Amino acid sequence: MYRIAVLFLTLFLTINETVAQTDFTWSEDIACIIYSHCTTCHNSNGVAPFALESYDDVVTFKDNILLQVTNRSMPPWPAQSPFGLQGDNSLSDEEINAISEWVINETPMGDIANEPTVPVFDTDIVIQDPDLIIEIPEFTVPNLSDNDLYKCFVFPMNFGEDIYVTGIEVVPGNKRAVHHVLLYEDDSNIPISLDNADPEIGYQCFGGIGSNNATLVGGWAPGGDPQFMPEGMGIRISANTNLVAQVHYPSYAVGEVDQTDIRIKYTTANQRNLSVSPVLNHFTSMIDGPLIIQPNDVRTFNQVWTVPTKMTITGVAPHAHLICTSMKSWAETPSGEIIDLVDIPNWDFDWQKFYGYNRPVVLEQGTRIFGRATYDNTVNNHHNPNFPPQLITLGEDTDEEMMVFFYTMTFYQPGDENLVFAEHNHAGHVEDCGFALTDVDEQLISSKIHLHPNPVSKTLYIDSELSVTNIIVFNLLGHKVIDVSGGEITAVDTSELAPGTYSIQIRSEGLITSQLFVVER
């Protein structure tokens, strides 16, 4: 399928190259986009399979790049939220169109003197000056007869006084061996007793860490980034306690050697206390469980949790395994208002993050938080670990399934509605290089616009608190398929669009935002 897509794109470019007109060049426009959004992983020391550190590198992979950016597979940023998500490295519609037209126009170089400096990435570690490093002992994954292994490592702590974690970064020593890492605090003696009772290094801890006193501090899963708390907030850890790192080693990692580190920033100054809690989970909040997916079946499951008192939400972390295909969470207030919290329409096990909101979400007492996830246990799901498909049940092994939404939250304080954790939804550019993007507050307009129905068949309606004066719809090749201007626009005719995913760019009162919608017949 991939080869067919590349051949189609190559044919498309050949047919259209004589008529495409563009002023985009590598040095003035495209280098800025690539260095800012792609080279962070695609560098000589990065996790990506090839480097994008020069004009020649990018031209070599131009067809692959065009395919990946136009279908929004790269850069990988699967989640969406009207409140904005910190570190959002996805490309804007303008950037996607610039790359598309640049490739179509045979990748002009431009004036090399205007090319931004190639960024240098000596390491992918973000927290270079931690206040504490938890060093997990070197560990070789043993043969456990195709069973995954959960290992807990205990670190007794004496800080002298309570601390507040303000940043945490898990640095897997061997990403081929590590499925995920969770760090807990536990002020009981249970983890030490369990550790002493196990003759091996650490102790086996399938599920939790074996103690009901444990509270989650943070973690890492494939594709995860460091977590930073909003200014003035932190996760409180007692002065005398145990930190317990739970590491999940999958069965396929037998023989691999790992030595994972956890790097922590903290302060002893008093902070607002944050908690990280799996309020939506496959045990206590399932509406239509249990989480069992028969072979050759596609199933959707739902969860709900009621907010016990007025809360301020600062982040979210959805979690599932291989056959999950989408995850979404939203809130419904006692008055019936719907608040979208996070949407991952194309779930990918390899890209899981603790997402921090750009703006807080304030939820009244009695608000219900919902979660929904779809699982495809058919041959159509290329992530399915079994061929032919097998029965999938609830479990923590990679070839089983989970459905969890962790929320980071604190008790509400007056004025939380006005807090801003991050100014912009779009990731900054290296050297403030000069690709011309409209510098607007996308979160503001996104929160005031609702598209429905989505998926849509004939008419897409736009409910907006602002006056919408222009909409542009792009297909996944980055080509403009609808452009409507003038007057106040409340609906878009989609009857002529082929089934598929589209991006709609909405301009309203000097602001601009983009959202995705799906056409189905």
Image (cartoon, rainbow, N blue to C red):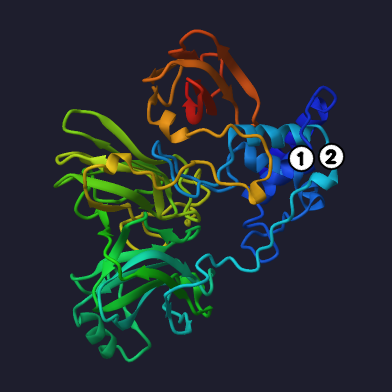
Q: In this view, does 255 lie above or below 58?
A: below
Find residue 462 and report its horizontal and vertical position in percent. Answer: 41, 18
Q: Does the residue at mark 1 contact the one at mark 2 (Cβ under 8 Å)?
A: yes
Tell which residue pokes out farthest to the top in this image. 487
Quadrant (top left/top right/bottom left/bottom right) for the N terminus: top right
Task: Identify the mark at residue 28; answer none if there is no mark.
Answer: 1
Q: Nearer the viewer, residue 88 or 498?
A: 88
Q: Is residue 246 visible?
A: yes
Find residue 304 and report its horizontal and vertical position in percent. Answer: 22, 43
CA–CA distance in space, label 1 to label 2: 7 Å
Disc 2 on helix, strand or loop? loop
Q: How crowded is mark 1: few (under 14 residues within 10 Å), some or many (20 or more)?
A: many
Q: Can residue 397 be seen in this view?
A: no
Disc 1 on helix, strand or loop? helix
Residue drawn 70% across the image and 34% down it: 98
Q: List the residue tagged with mark 2.
A: 110
Find residue 432 and report its horizontal and vertical position in percent. Answer: 64, 46
- Give the side of residue 71 with respect to residue 211, left or right: right
